[in-house]
Amino acid sequence: MVGKAEETPRERYRAQVRAEIKERAWEQIAASGAPGLSLNAIARQMGMSGPALYRYFAGRDELITELVRDAYRSLADVFRAAAASGADLDGLGRALRAWALDDPQRYFLVYGTPVPGYHAPDDVTTTAREIMTVVLDAARPVAGPADTTGLDDHLAEHREWAGDHPADPAALRRALSFWTRLHGVLSLELAGHFTGMGFDPAVLYGAELDRLAHAVR
């Protein structure tokens, strides 16, 4: 079996510089949001010229794409590990909140307001779908009220977001409710909208997760 070729010193240096650029980018995003990301500012912080930095990332969009890839890959790995250990929807929901609280800026980059003028490449969508596949795998139907809103029929006709997953409409509804309702609570919590309301968002999230984990209501 042929092993992976050892990195050259030049390749290692390039990887180190790219990693530092991404670290500086996250610092900028934390300070002023993704729309304010500036490669020239990062270059100045690193003591480099603008043209020198552009040898590592061709532009702002390429850098954002790399950060988005890392963020999605991180959550996909968290979900895969949770599923491998037997996590159900409850376990996935708790893993999602822990991942989001660990780095709110990473969360908002992929699940917050889109960056103006930025369009993610197809491979990013593929990783996002991998995350949803884990949710769909865990969203087996449970006893609960029948759908009387027409949502199941709608999801049966429009299931592009689920890819080729064989989940039936009830499971699609359960997965979609899990995804939208938990992200709703998380987004409000991380943005500070519960501050001063006098209750613990963790309790609200846990109650919502408990309802979703047992049945879609």
Image: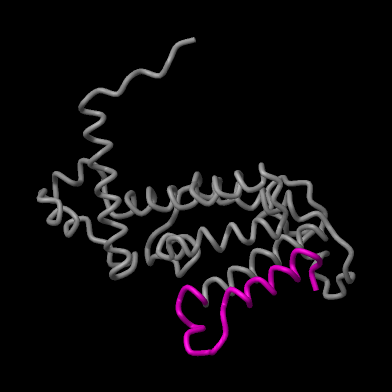
Depth check: 187 or 68 in front? 187
Image quadrant where residue 36 sits = bottom left
Depth check: 39 or 23 in front? 23
- Residue under the image location 48 percent in, 65 percent down: 101
- Residue under the image location 73 percent in, 69 percent down: 210
Residue 152 among those drawn in magenta: no
Give left or right: position of 46 versus 194: left
Image quadrant where residue 199 sits = bottom right
Magenta highlight range:
189-217
Give left or right: position of 65 versus 96: left
Give left or right: position of 33 versus 176: left
The percent coordinates of residue 174 (x first, y second) are 76, 63
Depth check: 52 or 210 in front? 210
Quadrant where the C terminus sits is bottom right
- Residue under the image location 47 percent in, 73 percent down: 190
Depth check: 64 or 99 in front? 99
The percent coordinates of residue 31 (x first, y second) are 28, 69
The percent coordinates of residue 28 (x first, y second) are 27, 63
